[in-house]
Image (spheres, helix red, strand yellow):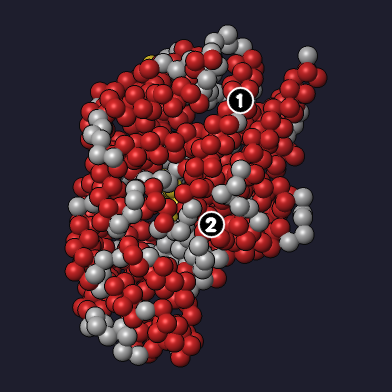
Amino acid sequence: MRNRIAVATAAALVACATYAQTVDIRDTWNLAELYPSLQAWNAEQDRLNTQITDLGKCAGQLGASAGRFKQCLDLSADMDKRIARMYVYASEKFSDDTSVPANLELTQRAELLNSKLNESQAFMKPEILKIGRERIEGFLKQEPTLAIYRHPLDDILRTAEHTLDKEGEELVAKFGLVTGTGNTVYTTMTNADMPWPTIKLSTGEEVRLDASAYTKWREAANRADRKLVMDTFFGAHKTYEQTFGITLYSQLKEDMVMARVRKYPDSITAKLDANKLPVAVMDTLIAQANATLPTLHRYFRLRAKMLGVQEMRYYDIYPPLVSTKLKFPLVDAKAATLAAVAPLGADYAAAMRKGFDSRWMDVYPRKGKLSGAHMAGYAYDVHPYVLMNYNDDYESQTALAHEWGHAMHSYLSNANQPFATASYAIFVAEIASTLNEALMLDHMLKVAKGDDERLYYLGSALEAIRGTYYRQAMFGEFERQIHKRVDAGEALTGESFTKAYCEILKRYHGHDQGVVTIDDAYCLEWAYIPHFYSGFYVYQYATSIAASSLFAQRIIKKEPGALDKYVKLLKSGSSDYPYDLVKAAGVDLATPAPYQATAARMNQIMDEIEKILAKKR
């Protein structure tokens, strides 16, 4: 049922009726591989509704026999697989154009159906707990094909004290209909409804300053333009500070309530225990980030020196340390990414090339399209889908490598795991993406033409560590604080969030030490970060770059067994707990060592930059 239009055509262009621009269909994803039409999606919904009825007959029968137990688990897993595929289709249709009501309606229908599915499955955990570990171990011995569920079953059994009875689980499932409202409102507002301002740059160019344009123009060469971009962008957020405060506070309250319902002491323990992650991981990260702030401040002072500014301001963080006229068009970015990942083996690169050539990705920004970049890899029987907003710059090229790291992780996991253990935790996911960024840097340094180009890539690497390690640790510390305050019963407003964020932002950037001056207007940045609606998510970027840096070093050096351990990690899905999987691959993220190594790597890059600068002088 695949839509084959233009895949075999040399230069197939299609005029997009919704937008005043021409789009090469090869640069859009082919959602027809999920469902050829809305009618097919509706038919799938009917099949899922029938399965929901069938699953109801399993209630009270899970312990009848090993065979019946397996039959019911298989049915439930197939239902999960079906709704995941439906949700990818609905959510990526919404990503295509967030302003189309029908697209939003489809995501809402998927959410309603998912809530109904969760409600139908609510009896399973309490019933599995009632059966007990001893009897389930007996089932596993009697029915060898149950082995694919061994880890998921262990995950249920270990959370016995946090699982409610059948009526309680059904009630929690019903509340799924009203959870996530704050995130939905925020996403719709910032991508479709918010009246983004238009500014005129020093070149005379007028720019509509939405999120995609902000990420592009905040690194403008002209300092006055950068200031104008930040002043205007965060000024727009200031207008809605109270509204953004309400949406975020509602999400924090939701997390707090669910932690209490599940009998956890606080939100962070509840969130991290979903994947059996030690709270020590996040606390160690925050402690080490603060302990190595002098390294971050060294970077800012070096940046000020290279940019030639007397007083480093927040809007001086993003422009490249070395000005360049280099462009990174998509065709070159794809080639560079394939070359960069060559150390991961021929099979890995071949799978990525197949994705590039087969319309697994939607590439360029357009009005109404969801901003940013992401990968959806949970359509198990199809393939991963990648969303980009490509701008022909090096940041876009590294984002391409990043998202395709995710895509290849899903591809390998889906190919090597049964559906029951094919998904993987974010804790592991961001290792796959940031490792590809490290490989991209290594490749670009090898092909760089001269010291100026090397300085450009080294400067980009410093910014990657700042943005992926220190910035995400800073976000994590902000989340840690605001969740703790809400858990304690404190009411928070937009103004409260701004004040809390401002203190952390200024501390990380050395405001009081004269390292980087932070204007109070920029303390609205918290309202720009969508990840805060997924509690305790972003800190995993920081833990991941700490781990991936070590993995990349070992792979590049061709240390014995390094590649095999890493590829095994990518193929492992959720066959074990994520912290244990990473530790087995050679990195313990509950210890200071990986974070200290990350700071050391940053200092090594700055040493190399200063050597080049000294030579140039």
Q: In the rendering, at what x and y percent does residue 366 appear?
A: 37, 38
The amino acid type of the residue labelled 1 equals: Pro
Amino acid type, callout 2:
Tyr
Q: Position of residue 106 (x, y in %)?
A: 24, 56
- Mark 1 element type: helix
Among numbered discs 2 and 1, the one appearing first in the sequence: 1
Classify 10 Å Cα crowding around label 1: few (below 14), some (14-19), many (20 and above).
some
- Please name whichever residue, 521 or 108, is drawn nearer the observer in this view of the structure: 521
As drawn, 512 above or below 394: above
- Is any part of residue 453 visible from this angle? no
Residue underneath mark 2: 579
Residue 79 versus residue 106 in the image, above or below: below
Location of residue 395 in the rendering, given as x and y in whole percent from the top left corner: 54, 35
Point 32% across, 60% down: residue: 87
Q: Which residue is mark 1?
A: 294
Give the CA separation, mark 2 to mark 1.
29 Å
Viewed as shown, does residue 569 lie left or right of 84? right
The total of numbered circles placed on residues is 2
- Are the residues tagged 2 and 1 within 8 Å (C-beta)? no
